[in-house]
Image (tube, helix red, strand yellow):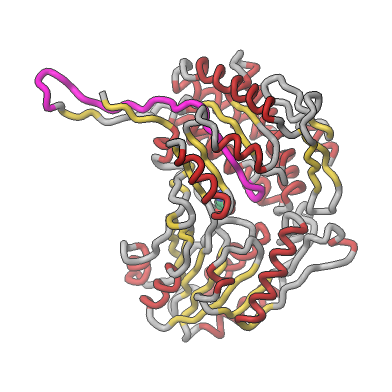
Amino acid sequence: MENILNNLNIEPKHSGSSSGLNWMDLGGELITSCSPVDGKIIGEVGSSTRQQYDSIMDCALEAFKVWRMVPAPKRGEIVRQFGEELRKNKSNLGKLVSYEMGKSYQEGLGEVQEMIDICDFAVGLSRQLSGITLHSERSQHRMYEQYHPLGVVGIISAFNFPVAVWAWNAALAWVCGDVCVWKPSEKTPFCAVACQKIMANVLKNNDLPEGVCCLINGDYQVGEWLTGDGRVPLISATGSTRMGRIVGATVAERFGKSILELGGNNAMIITPDADLNIATVGVVFGAVGTAGQRCTTTRRLIIHESIYNTVKENLIKAYAQIKIGNPLDENNHMGPLIDQDAVKMYLSAIDKIKSSGVVVVEGGVLSGDDYSSGCYVKPMIAEVDNDKEIVQTETFAPILYLMKYNSIQEAIDLQNGVPQGLSSAIMTNSVREAEGFLSHAGSDCGIANVNIGTSGAEIGGAFGGEKETGGGRESGSDAWKAYMRRQTN
Ligand code: UN1
């Protein structure tokens, strides 16, 4: 791992510096990053004190004055250069993501590819930040809408997508003329340091202020400073619904804007005429990928009663073939959970499942040399009714609940019958069922898929969900509008 840090120009005792400040020298507490892969310490990163937070905010505010004067297509050019650097650093960054977060190397590379893709998208967008022109009721006047930069955008990101989701926000914010202050998860600080360094270099080579891309490492306290800060007009936060409730209220209290991308409880409906091969692959990728730690993970399967036993048998067979182990070894399908706390939550969910349902594929924590970090668990399947509290709650682990349906309406009601509303899928060859699922009376989620699983975002579309998922939209389509202020002229 030291090699990778070296290649990315990071020292294992990293100051976490941003905008010329060295946090270690300034005495902030240290965050130790431990890999869930083998339990080894990756290094230490300095966390920010309030004083440092304020000086970084000053840097960001100063940088905004410069950055907003750079024409949008030229800002796009800077984002293009950032994308080029990501291409060069793809394998190193992908490995760091895999080692610090625990997802498979392929998924780590996938994250970096998503960053590259959003950069490409943002470059094109930088020439298309358009507003509409309207006829005015006043004689000899015209009326039109312009979108102006907002200022400092605060980005709070989660451990499970330590680089991609930040980039979804940052790349758009930058072409929109905003500067970013990033508070990453304290569980994956080195991924953040690596990204900030890459962009800092691009900015330096173009004689632009480093404050365009600020990083503040720290715990929830830093998050509180950021969300309560009137100098930050927009907070984009990814994480649990519990966290989002606090962030949303704090930002609303000061009339700030927020983009919230919170918990999911995603279901897949499998209908009688579904292609069961496609369905099985979709389920396994959706439920087991990233060890069940995506907000888009498939957590519930709603299966027609006529094929219920077949689907169940297929899954039992497929789960028996899943190889769990070091995610950097490409023979393995599933890596560890992020840390011991996640393992505790997984185990407590299993207790609740056992008291309210029937286990189909047993879970449990793995032990032995290959699993020395203590974070490796088995993917589990259980039959539990939709209305049970454990099914209504998002558990960030590879646990899949099976349930039966009889009529398609019943299936849609089950699918919608949870507080969250991020992603959903139907497996069917029936046009009527597919269109029904996609209609206004169908899935109530921000994302509704036909014949693909619930996870795996495409950056060209707007990403986000309804209800307790928070209502925010990030990434493609016209999500950029949230990063700007609209003015009617
Ligand atoms: C995906 O499924 O490809 O936390 C993206 C998450 C989301 C990103 C999911 N913010 O899982």
Residue drawn at x 66%, y 45% as measured from the top left = 109
Which of the pair 398/309 is nearer the observer?
398
Q: Say above or below: 443 vs 35.
A: below
Q: Say above or below: 182 vs 142.
A: below
The quarter of the picture where residue 391 lies is bottom right
Q: Where is residue 14 in the image (x, y as percent from the top left)?
A: 80, 31
From this viewpoint, which residue is outermost toward the left? 139
Quarter holding the N terminus is top right
42 to the left or right of 129 = right
Quarter holding the C terminus is top left
From this viewpoint, which residue is outermost toward the right? 369
Which of the pair 343/28 is nearer the observer?
28
Q: Does the rendering let one see residue 9?
A: no
Q: Say above or below: 310 vs 434.
A: below
Would you say residue 148 sits in the magenta stretch? yes
Number of numbered discs: 0
The quarter of the picture where residue 390 lies is bottom right
Q: Where is residue 469 in the image (x, y as percent from the top left)?
A: 49, 55
323 to the left or right of 435 = right
Residue drawn at x 78%, y 53% as measured from the top left = 36
Q: What stretch is highlighted in magenta?
A: 137-161
234 to the left or right of 156 = left
Which of the pair 159/313 is nearer the observer?
159
Q: Position of residue 305 (x, y in %)?
A: 47, 85
Would you say residue 290 sits in the magenta stretch? no
Q: Say above or below: 266 vs 135.
A: below
Q: Does the rendering let one see residue 272?
A: yes
Residue drawn at x 60%, y 71% as measured from the top left = 400
From this viewpoint, which residue is outermost toward the front? 253
